[in-house]
Amino acid sequence: MSVAKLDEQLCFALYSASSHLTSLYRPLLEPLDLTYTQFIVLMALWQKDEISISQLAERTSLSKATMTPLLKRLEKKGLIHRKVLVDNERQKSIVLTDAGRDISLQSIEITNKVSCATGLTEQEAKSMIALCQKLKFPT
């Protein structure tokens, strides 16, 4: 009888690698009182601020159900605030506070440390990112 072999599955390799990378971020984000998912949201906002929750969820590949409690925690920490849109009171845009922007100054150091910890060369990392994007956005 033939069975699927765990170590030969792309899904398991990606899952395991993702779990490992997340664990590398944990001690670096702990002093900032951030989770990895919160850090992802902040990175997206550092690139483009004042976007809707839907746009932010799409950009970060997080569900809207995940976004709501996550954004509430970031707001409670004083890193973002939700701003009601002038033309649509039911929609809100997410805006970084000064404290939220200040954390961005530490982001390069954090991501560089994780990058070094992976043992990948810069080219290997770029290739891996390209392959993951190919999986996510097939042509």
Image (cartoon, rainbow, N blue to C red):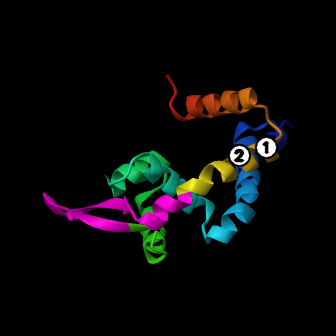
Q: Residue at the location (49% across, 75% down)?
A: 77
Assign a secondary structure to mark 1: helix
- Front residue of this view, candidates 43 and 70: 43
Q: Quick one: which residue is furthest to the left in this view? A: 87
Tell me the magenta residue range: 81-103
**Residue 47, how many percent across, how many down?**
45, 46
Q: Which residue position is annotated with label 2?
A: 112
Labels 1 and 2 touching (C-beta < 8 A): yes
**What amino acid type is highlighted by mark number 1?**
Cys
**Residue 46, how many percent across, how many down?**
46, 51
Q: Which residue position is annotated with label 1?
A: 116
Quadrant of the rendered structure where residue 53 is?
Answer: bottom left
- Label 1 CA crowd tier, 10 Å (few <14, some 14–19, many 20+): few
Quadrant where the image shows the N terminus: top right
**Residue 25, how many percent across, how many down?**
70, 57
Assign a secondary structure to mark 2: helix
Q: Is residue 31 left or right of residue 37?
A: right
Q: Residue at the location (54% across, 55% down)?
A: 104
- Front residue of this view, candidates 20 and 1: 20
- Count of marks overlaid on the render: 2
**What amino acid type is highlighted by mark number 2?**
Asn
User: In this rendering, is residue 92 above or below 69?
Assistant: above
Residue 95 sits inside the magenta stretch: yes
Q: Is residue 44 left or right of residue 53?
A: right
Q: Residue at the location (79% across, 39% down)?
A: 4
Helix, strand or loop: magenta stretch: strand
